[in-house]
Amino acid sequence: TKWVYSFGDGAAEGRADMKNLLGGKGANLAEMASLGLPVPPGLTISTEVCTYYYDNERQYPSELKDQVAEAIKAIETSVGATFGDPENPLLVSVRSGARVSMPGMMDTVLNLGLNDQTVEGLAKNSENERFAWDSYRRFIQMYSDVVLGVDHYHFEELIDLHKDEKGVDLDTDLTADDWKVLVAAFKKKTQETLGEPFPQDVHDQLWGAIGAVFGSWRIERAKVYRKLNNIPEEWGTAVNVQAMVFGNMGETSATGVAFTRDPSTGENEYYGEYLINAQGEDVVAGIRTPQNLTKAAREKAGAKDLSMEESMPEVFGQLASVFEKLEKHYKDMQDIEFTVQRGKLWMLQTRSGKRTAKAALKIAVELAADGLIDEKTAVMRVEPGALDQLLHPTLDPDAPRDVLTRGLPASPGAAHGAAVFTADEAEEWAKAGKDVILCRTETSPEDIHGMHAAKGILTARGGMTSHAAVVARGMGRPCVSGAGAIRIDAKAEIMHCMGREIKKGDLITIDGASGEVMIGEVKTLQPELAGDFATLMEWADTYRTLKVRTNADTPADTTTAREFGAEGIGLCRTEHMFFEGERIVAVRQMILSETEAGRREALAKLLPMQRADFTEIFKIMRGLPVTIRLLDPPLHEFLPREDDEFEQVAGALGISVEKLKRQANELHEFNPMLGHRGCRLGISYPEIYEMQARAIFEAAVAVEKESGETVVPEVMIPLVATEKELSMLRQRVEAEAAKVFTEQSHTVEYMVGTMIELPRAALQAAKIAQSADFFSFGTNDLTQTAIGISRDDAARFLDEYVKLDIFAQDPFVSIDQEGVGELVKIGTERGRSTKPDLKLGICGEHGGDPASVMFCHDVGLDYVSCSPFRVPIARLAAAQAAL
Ligand code: PEP
Ligand code: MG
C-alpha cells in the first residue's frame, strides 16, 4: 500500500482533489508544487495511516518506515543536505493536516533535526551562530511543549530569568552565548520534568512528532471541536513533513500571511501582513507588530514601517504573480502563508479563504464577471444564512464591547438605544426622537406599538417562536429573547443582571444575530442592498423553481417584503391586525361578550378596519396571491391584564369590571396553544369568520373595480384536524362570498384552503383535500404538536437537547426532517393523491431557514413563505436546492 506522497521541485504525487487522503494542507502543497510554484520539498503521510493507527492499537503499517525514509531521501537530494548530518543537516517542519482545518489538534513543530551536533553544522552553514542556537532553543521549546507535554511557560520563565540576570528587556538583546546557556537550561528542565533526556536522535525526534500528530486526533479538545462542527471521527489527519525554510535569517528574510482579496470587504486588493527576520509563529503570536503587505494598505493605515512592496519590491512582485496564478487556478480567493529566506520566496500553504458575507457576495459576483466561474457557481458560493448579516445593521467588529449577558438570537440585526421597560414609554421616547431598546420580561400583543417604536427588543423569557421573536422578525427589528439572567422590574424602572443594574434611559446594545446584550453603545454598520447583492439575487432567481412568499400582516411589512422579492403573501395573520390601538378593545369585546349580539356589535366595529387593511395589502401585492388566514389567536394573547384594560373593555360591553374579570377568568386556559383557537373559534362563533370573509371579499371587489387588475385572495382556515371542520367552514365562507358578489354585482376568483398544523390533519390529508384548494403547512404548530413540546416553553430545555445531540438543531428553527418533515411528506402525498393540482406551501418559521427550504424543494412544495427579511435567504436557498 502507498502510505506516503512526495512533493517538491515542480512535481508531486498528490493533487488538490485528494484532500480526503492527504488532508487540506498536503493536497494543496502537492498542487502548488505541480503548478511549479516554489514549495519546499516534503512528504505527506496519508489519513489512511491515521485510520490504521487507531484500528491497530496505535501501531503503524509495516511499510511506513521504509516509505518515509525513501521520501526523506528525496528531500535530502532536493535540498542538498542530510537529515542528522552534523556537517550539513537537513531540518524539517512537522504539521498536522486534516481535511478541514481543525483547531485543538497538534499544529506545528519547526526546526526538527537539530541536536547538540547538528546545531554546529547549521551555525557554520548559515554563518550565523546566534541564528543556529536561537533555532535550536525554539525547537526544544516547541517539541517539549507539543510532543513531550512540558508546558511552554517553563521555558519562557527561564528566558525571563536570564534576561533579568543580564539586565536586558528584549529577546533580540540575547547573543549566541546566551542562547547556548538557555539551551542547556531547557534540556535540563525537560529532563527534570520527564526523567529522560531531550531526544538527540533525529529519527526519534521525527517519529515522536509524527506520533504526536496522530495522537492529537483523539485528544479531548479535538473531539469537542469535531462534535461542534459535525466532522466525522473516521476522517483522521494526515502528517506533513517538509524541508525548513527560514524567515529569520536576517534582514533579507521574512515571513507572512496573505489573502488574495480583502476577506472582510471582498475588495480585489491584496491583504495581509509580514515580518522581517521572523519565524512563522512570531506573526501569529503578536509579540511584534507585523507590517502591511502593500504600499496602499500601509498608507491607508497611516503606518510608518515600510510595506513589503516597498522594502522587498522584487520578492513582492514574485508573490503577487503567485497570488494571480493561485486565484486563476483555484478560481477562488486564497489564504496563503509564505516565507522569504535570504531573498528567495517560498510558499508554505494555500487554501480557500474564510470571508464575511459581504466579501463572499462581492468575490462571487466579481469572479463570475471575470469569467473565472459561471453564475451557477457564484450562486452556490454564498451561504444563504449568511445573508442575514447583510440585510440588517451589524455590530462594527472593531468596536469595543462590554457584554452583559446572552440570550437567544431571536431576530437578527444589531441596535443600540436607551433601555425602557414599557411599550408606552418606548413609543413616547421614540416620538421625542430617541433610540430605545424595549426591555420586557416577555412581550404580549399590547406591546406591539412599543416594539414598532423601538430599535430593538430584549426579553428575559421566551423561545425562538415566542411572541416577541415572531413579531420582531416580522417587523425586521433586532431581538434577543429568553435572556434568562435578566430580572426586569418595570415598576421600579430597573433591570438587574449578574450583579449589575441598568436604569431606565441607560444605553444598551443588543445583537440579535448572536444573542449578546451589551452595556453602552456599540457602533453599528448599515446594510447595502443594491449592487452585488441585487446581482446575485437576480442570478439565484433564474435557477430556482420554488416560489418564495412572505408572512406579512401590515402594509409596511408587505412593502418591505415586496422590496426583498416576495412573490405573494403566504400568511397574513389576521389576529395580528388587531393588535393596534382601538382595535384591541373591540377584539376583547368580541371575545368576552356572552351573547351573539354582543359579538356582532364588536364585529361591526372591526369590519371596516379589516376591509381597509386588506384593501391596502391587495393594492401593494398587485395581482400576486395573498393568503389570508382567518382568526387564530391563542385566547390568552387577547385577554386583558391591567386594570385600565379591564375598565375599557367593561365600558365597551356595558358590564361591571368584576363581572368582566369573572368572565375572563372563565376563559382562562391551562394550555392555550392547544385551546379554543383556530377553526375551533370559527366553529363556535361562525359570525367571526363570516365578518372576516366579508371584509376580504369586499376589499377584493373594491380593488378589482378600482384598478382593473385581478386580485387572488386565498382564504385559509387554521388548525384543522378533520375534514368536517373544513367543509363546514368552507360553506360559510362560500355563502358570504356569494352574498358580497351579489351585493356588489362583481365576482372575484378565490380559493379556500387549510393549514396543516396537526398530525391528524397530515394523516387525513387525502380526505381533507376534498374540501381544500390548497394546503399550507404550519410547521410551528406542527412541530409543537408532533413532538409534543410547547412553542412557548420548550426553550428552557431545548438548548440542552441540542448540546446533547438529541436534536441536531432547535426543531422550531430548522425543521425536524425525520419527524415533522415526515408528516409534511405524508400530507403532500396524500393531499395530492386526491387533488393532483393541490397548491402546497409552508408558512411556519422554517420557511426562512435554508436547510428547511431545501427540504421543501425536495418534498415538492410549490412555495415557502417567511418573514420579510428572510425572503432573500429563502430565494438563495431555493436556487441552491435546484442546482
Ligand atoms: C404555524 O403554526 O406554523 C403558523 C404559521 O401559524 P402560527 O405561527 O400563527 O400559529
Ligand atoms: Mg399555527
Image (cartoon, helix red, strand yellow):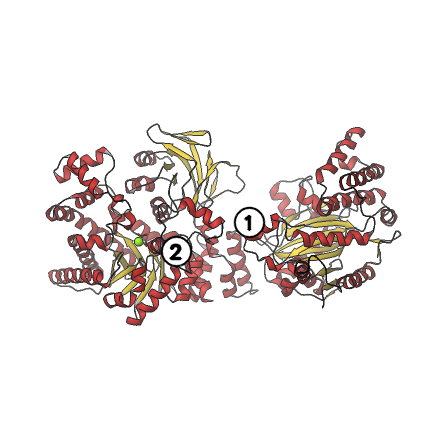
Q: Is residue 339 left or right of residue 641?
A: right
Q: Residue 334 appears at what percent x and percent y?
A: 62, 56
Q: Residue at x 23, y 55 (%)?
A: 679
Q: Earlier in the sequence, mark 1 or mark 2?
A: 1
Location of residue 463 by image quarter: top left
Please indicate, yes or no, whether residue 830 appears anywhere in the rendered image.
yes
Does ligand 1 reach within 8 Å of label 2's beta carbon? yes
SS at mark 1 in the image: loop
Q: Residue 197 appears at what percent x and percent y?
A: 81, 44
CA–CA distance between discs 1 and 2? 29 Å
Q: Is residue 365 left or right of residue 857?
A: right
Please indicate, yes or no, whether residue 244 appears anywhere in the rendered image.
no
Q: Residue 816 appears at what percent x and percent y?
A: 42, 57
- Nearer the observer: mark 1 or 2; the answer is 2
Question: Does residue 228 lie above or below 172 as drawn?
Answer: below
* Label number found at residue 264: 1
Quarter of the image with the N terminus in it = bottom right
Residue pointed to by mark 2: 846
Q: Nearer the viewer, residue 777 or 309?
A: 777
Q: Amino acid at mark 1?
A: Ser
